[in-house]
Image (cartoon, helix red, strand yellow):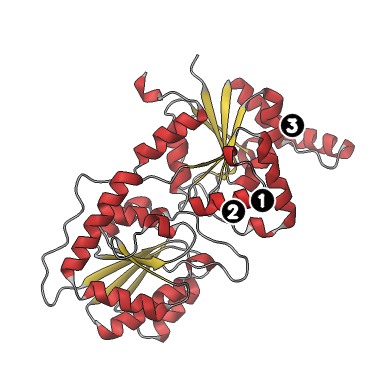
Amino acid sequence: MTEKLAIITPALGVRSETFIRRHIQDLCVHQTVAVAVTASQPGAGYWQADGPTLIFDRDLRSLWHRVQRGIHRRLDPSYDDALPATEAFLKRHRVRVILGEFLDASLRWLPVAQTLGIRFFGHAHGYDVSKTLRQPTWQKEYLRYNATDGIITMSHASRDRLLSLGIHPAKIHVVPYGVDVPDQPHASPRERAERTIRCVAVGRMVGKKAPILTLDAFRRAAEACPRLHLDYIGGGELLPAARQFVRAFGLEDRVTLHGAQSSEFVQNTLRQADIFLQHSITDPDTGDEEGLPVAILEAMAEGLPVVSTRHAGIPEEVEEGKTGYLVDEGQTGDMAERLLALARDPELRKEMGHAGWRRVRNHFTWEQERSELLRLLGLKDSRAH
């Protein structure tokens, strides 16, 4: 009997969670079920699972469920009606392996896996191995992963943090995110003296993405090189501040803020671009950090040189001086200088872009990620059947 995989995630269909979309839609084709708390817009619901799903804010709101919840909670205030519903769903679909997305959210389902004798893995992503790890309660809770089949994380930087908590080394597996890589890096338009040099930034406008710092670095560079234009793709709480920055510095003709867009829009924009920018930082208020930014890998796969920061897993993606440049967090002047160096040298852009494409092709493809995940989860390649 083919073993089925359950992927459990807080929200199904989040635009920015392309890595989770890949796990649900492409990891174990026709043998995956999905469980999520919500799949509702505006936060989620922008893509769907192909197989059976259990969505709590949709499937557990019937009158019968509300009555049962009320009865149980009078007897036990800590009663969680999602647990028996999930247990029944997993049994009905004969699930044998659970992959829980985000370490803190996944621990909720560990008792269900233990009750049913299902193998259980947690997958770390970003905030759960940075912001969450600042909290002593979660530092203790994460030790429960020593009793699971393992943790999968995307970078060696995050592995080191998990090891520092006391999680056994044999339980932690580094599997970098993977992306699709074209057969050749895209060809930039023929250089002309008057041609616009298109920069692109992609990411939710939140603290760790530091959109204002990215914009400030671009502003500094554009003062010295008027041919620069920035397409910034991403929505989020800091989008109004980004709009204000653009207006305040008169950058309306040089910066286009696209807001949140589909992955297809992102890919098309990358193919028209020359340079990729991302000024990631540790959020000074929450401690939230990146994991291994997929947008950087997608840009490198398209043959774009990258200018970014020495932050979290980014130095594991970008080879300094070979596939792009890295600067210290907060140093927008340094970022502007690196951007100008690329803007003024089309051959350097091409050389670094091609080196980035080769690096992703050799180390960060989706097929490499998929193969390693299937091996760790003990699953066969469903496409072979």
Instruction: State if disc 2 and disc 1 touch (CB < 8 Å).
Output: yes
Q: Is residue 93 above or below residue 131?
A: above
Q: Position of residue 179 (x, y in %)?
A: 35, 46
Q: Report the residue marked by disc 2.
A: 161
Rendered residue at 24%/71% (across/down): 342
Q: Determine whether the residue tagged by mark 1 lies in a helix, strand or loop.
A: helix
Q: Determine whether the residue tagged by mark 2 lies in a helix, strand or loop.
A: helix
Residue 113: quarter of image: top right
Q: Position of residue 106 (x, y in %)?
A: 63, 41
Residue closest to the eye, 198 or 99 = 99
The CA span between labels 2 and 3 is 44 Å
Q: Is residue 209 above or below residue 226?
A: above
Looking at the rendered structure, which numbered label has been put on residue 64? 3
Between circles 3 and 1, the one closer to the viewer is 1
- Furthest-right residue in view? 75
Q: Is residue 383 above or below residue 252?
A: above
Amino acid tagged 3:
Trp
Is residue 28 something that shows in the picture? yes
Q: Determine whether the residue tagged by mark 3 lies in a helix, strand or loop.
A: helix
